Each structure stands twice: as C-alpha cells, then as structure tokens.
Amino acid sequence: MFRLTPLNALLLSVCLGLAGCGGNDTSQPTSNSPTPVSAPSQDTGSSGNNNNDGTGDSTSNGGDNNNNAGTGDNANSDTPDDNTSETDPTFATAISTSRFLQQATFGTRPQDLDALTGKSASNWFKAQLKVPPSLIMPVVSEFTPPPTAEDDFNALYIESTSVAFWRHAIAGEDQLRQRMAFALSELLVVSNAGGEELTDIPEAVASYQDILIQHAFGNYRELLEAVTYSPAMGFYLTYMGNLKGDEVTGRMPDENYARELLQLFTIGVVTLNPDGTEQKDDNGATKELYTNQDITGLARVFTGLDMDYDTSDAQEINEFALPMAVYPENHSEKSKTFLGTTIAAGTGPKASVTQALDHIFAHPNVPPFVSKQLIQRLVTSNPSPAYVARVSAAFSSGQATLPDGSAVGDGRRGDLTATLAAILFDPEARAAATERGGKIREPIVRFTQWARAFSVKNITPEYQEMLWDTRDASMLGQHPYRSPSVFNFFRPGYTAPGSLSAASDMMAPELQITNASTITGYANFMTYYITGLQQEVDVEDLQASYDEENIPLNAENAVESFLASYDAEQALAGNPDALIERLDLLLCAGQLSATSKQEIKQILQTVAQNDEAEPLRLVHLAVLLVMTSPDYLVQK
C-alpha cells in the first residue's frame, strides 16, 4: 500500500511500546484526565428488544449507503430534557459520555456528546433496545446478480457481507445491537476466510450474521439453538450432513461441533466459580469438566442435520439462508451420554438437540464463561472476579437494574439484554480505570471510530475495495467475520510474551494480532483514509476495472465515498492545545496522557513552522498522531 515514511517510522517507534505496556502512560499526571464517574447506586443489567440509537443516525434499516453517518436529529424522544446526572452519572460529562459510547457503540460522534451529555444513559439504553435491527441479508440481495445475468459472478457480490458490516457498524441506528452482535461473533465464531462455500456463497455468513444481530438482545439458550441449526456453522464445524456411526465400516459421527460447543461456546474446559475464577481440588489442580467419551456421546446428538433442500427448492431460496433440516434416517438411534446425563436411545434428532442444549445451558459454568468474554470484548481484558460475578448473576437471573432504578431483562436465565446492561453499567466499567483496567482497541473498531468521530459522509464500502478484505498485516490485520479459525482472531486468555502486562499477570487478547507489521500497516491504512486519499481515485481506470470484473457500479460515485468532515478541527488548527483536547475527547474519552499531548503538540508545531502547513494538513497529522498513540490504542 504505502512505503514507511519518516513520520510513520516515528509512529512505529512510539507504538511499539504497546507490546510492553499494560495501559496508559502513568509516569506523569494527565492534564485533562477524565472526571471520575461515581458508581451507579444499583447493579445494572438489561433485557431486550431493538431500539433507537438515540444519537440520531440517519441511516435507514438495512443501510442507506449514501447516508451521512453524522446527520440526523440527535435528540432521542425517550430522553428527558432535564439533567439527570445526579441519579444517572453515566452521561454526567462529555468525557464520561464519550467513554461509555466507546464501549457500547462503534464510536463516539460529536453530535452524540451534544445530545446526550447531562441526559439519562438508562433512557438511551432502553431506547436502543427498540431500534429495528439493521440486517445483512438485504445488502447481499442488493448486490446479488439477477438470474438472467449471463455471468452471475462478481467480486462485489462475494464481498457484500463486508459491505453490509461496514455500513451498519458506522452508520447504523442500532449501534448497541450491532456492537453486541460483533462481540458475540468473536465468541460464537464462523468465518468466511477459508475460500470455500462460506466465501463463495455470501448468503451463508450473511444469514449467520443476522442470527447474531437478531438475538443480540435475546436469550443465549435460544441463540445457541439458532447457531446449531445454522448452515454456516454446520459447514464451518463440519457437522452438516453428519451421519450416524456405522459399526461395520467403523464410521464415527463427526465430533467437531460437539467439542467446540463445550470448549468455546458454553462452558470451557475446567470448572469455574461464579466469579470466573478456576476451581481447584485439594491438591491445587484445576478440575477438568469432561473427557473424550463425553465428546463422543455428544457428537451423536448432531447427526442427521443437513441443508433444507425441499424448502429451498420450493421457495427458490438459497439453502444457506435457511435453518438446517433434520433427517431422522441419518440420526444416531443410540443413547448419548455426556456431562453426567444420558439422552435415551431412540430419541429423535430435534428432541436430542433440545435436550442436549438444555443440559449444557444449565451448567453452572455458562454464566461466568460467557459473561467474562463479553466483558473482555466491550470493557476490559482483566475484569475483577467481583465484576464477573455481578454480570454472571445478571445472566443467571435474567434481570438487571439500570442506574435510574428501572429493571431490564425477562427474568429467564441467559437474557443477553440484562447481561449487556450489567456489563456496561457496572461500577467497574463506569469508575475511572485502574492500571489493570481497559483493553486494546481492535483494529476494526479503530476504523469505525474514525468514521463516526469525523462524520464521514457517503458510507459506501462498495466503492472501497480496501474495505472488502482488511486482514492483511499491511492493512488492519483483522476483518469482520473473517477470523483465521474458530478460536477467533485472538484467545481470551492470551498474554503477550515479554510484555509488562504479562509480567503483571494480565491478559491482553488483542496483542495476539499486534506486532511490528500490523502496527505499521494500521498506521498506513489510517493515513490513507484520514488524509482523504480515497477521493483521489482515477475514475476512468476504476470504471474500466468495474466493467471488466462485472461489477455494476458507477465509478464517479467513488470520488465522494467515505468523505470525512474536519471543519470543527480545522477551526482549531491554530491552537494545538485546543485541537488536541478535542481529539482527546472524541477519540480517547479524555485519556491522553500529559506526555502524549506534549509530544503531539511539539510535532504539530514543528511541522507548522517548517512547512507552513495548511490547517487541514495539520488536522490530518493530529488525528493520525492521536490514533497511533499508545494512549489511544489502549482503551481505558
């Protein structure tokens, strides 16, 4: 993409400190550190529906690709005009508002701060539950070649799931839902990185993404069932078409899904306490939960599931867009023994799946196992046991209390709205972060945050081929729904060898995809978009490429695609302190250290003195310096 410039070499040297740090620079006091937010008076949680962003996104359901992510009426009708900061301190200040939105959405926007600061975060949360979901499949349909097309293949159709993700993550009104669905996607992993059916048939992963989006505020038990019958999961974990065993030939049922369902999706491998810590026996050893015999028994449950070809043919729907059907003749009639229970011999496929999922879901490991990983994806890589225990309790009870005293959740075990509210409104999430608090920002979220912070217009990823696959280390080093394996982009318990965080016994999952190559790639990738190089496209060449690749787009529209607005920042270009403070608020929620601010200021002043830089160029540089600083990369 780009060669490493002297500036990016400097950025690289600054950012490489990340591998050895556990958080922000604490060697000096922060000149504008966040005002500590008092803990909510009650524990929190949530339950749910869909809802209104309350931040005024103008994107319609399904994603108007020409909408401005920064337009719309910012006032939420469910948000009172009176100041509620005394009883609901989450939005008490612009900094506390920005910090919450960076955990609960794909990024803070200036209009969000204007509309929400001093208002009720509880009302915002409840309003978000009512926003209709922005789904992936309608976008795929938008780019599906017509049946009459001579050539029914084009690259844009194949990448339409990526187009849909970027649209909804950046401009979707249902920000809380989209953010939760993305967190779930890194727990219940399906990936189209393999170059097989899940890559070539976008409906497969699109339907799976929609399952996560639709169930993001629902119940984890119901989500597990939808995931189990998903053709994408069936193909990915190889139990689609799984046949019962045959003693004559020695054939055994495929064990892949049975193993990952337990290990990765529900209970883990060792016994946990309700606070997520590992239980020990009298000798101090962990207690393993199951043996391979349990996996063998459970694998029999997931036999006889395959594509619903009859419905697909009758309704002319792609079979990957439908739940898998059951074929009793292929299902094991044997008894299925696992985790201390036995499903009786002769039990049919649907009943077997239901009984198996019910038994697994009732396991005491499920609440802490799921809760801790969701906390890690949204708030902090190293939640305290007390934090995990509080969220686990909300998961178990299916209810939580918002700061305004209202309850959310339907009272059933596994309610994800209650779990989400408990995560976001917990005292540990809302209080000033400690040295052990926070997490590395995922590269995907860094990009969406930039787009939202600077009111990017024309969210049209279809015109941005760079966004069709950002996995390469020269780019973001991560792409939505395209992890390298079922173990996600990074493991939840990963510690970076030789780092200060590892020496402090701290987990830093995102550091597993952070290295010298990805740091440089990220800086160059962001340089491209921050400086507006995406607008400097050769329209004639691009149109020729579209025509050759059978992509039905007008290249003239690419010139205005992902057009950022820096008007407010340019007005501050002559005042580096004020410019840095604004970027600190929008991008870092007031967490830039005094040292980082001073270093950024010195660079801006040097450039201005030596080059007589225009205001816009100074703003570009300031944004890049902030977004590649360790204080930004570590979200506190």
Image (tube, helix red, strand yellow):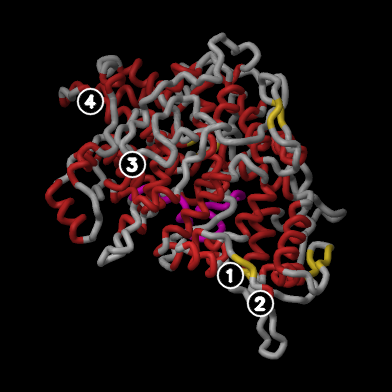
Is residue 378 rendered to the left or right of residue 30? right
- The magenta region covers 475-493
Q: Distance between the residues labelled 2 and 4?
A: 65 Å
Q: For the point 80% across and 73% down, which residue is it? A: 335
How many marks overall? Answer: 4
Q: Give me the disc on residue 306.
A: 1
* Percent coordinates x, y for residue 539 in the rendering: 15, 46
| Closer to the camera in the image, 312 or 82 | 312
CB under 8 Å between discs 1 and 2: yes
Q: Give me the disc on residue 330.
A: 2
Q: Give the mark nearest the N terminus, 2 or 4.
A: 2
Is residue 561 rendered to the left or right of residue 443? left
Is residue 202 rendered to the left or right of residue 370? left
Q: How far apart are marks 4 and 1 (CA)?
A: 56 Å
Q: Which amino acid does label 2 sit on?
A: Asn
Disc 3 marks which residue? 523
* Percent coordinates x, y for residue 200 in the rendering: 39, 64
Q: For the point 36% across and 26% down, which residue is it? A: 71
* Percent coordinates x, y for residue 282 in the rendering: 87, 54
Front of the two marks 2 and 4: 2
Q: For the point 69% across and 55% down, which residue is it? A: 268
Q: Which corner quadrant of the image does residue 92 belong to?
A: top right
Most frequent secondary structure within the magenta stretch: loop
CB under 8 Å between discs 2 and 3: no
Q: Give me the disc on residue 616.
A: 4
Q: Which corner quadrant of the image does residue 358 belong to?
A: bottom right
- Secondary structure at numbered mark 2: helix
Q: How far apart are marks 1 and 2 (CA)?
A: 10 Å
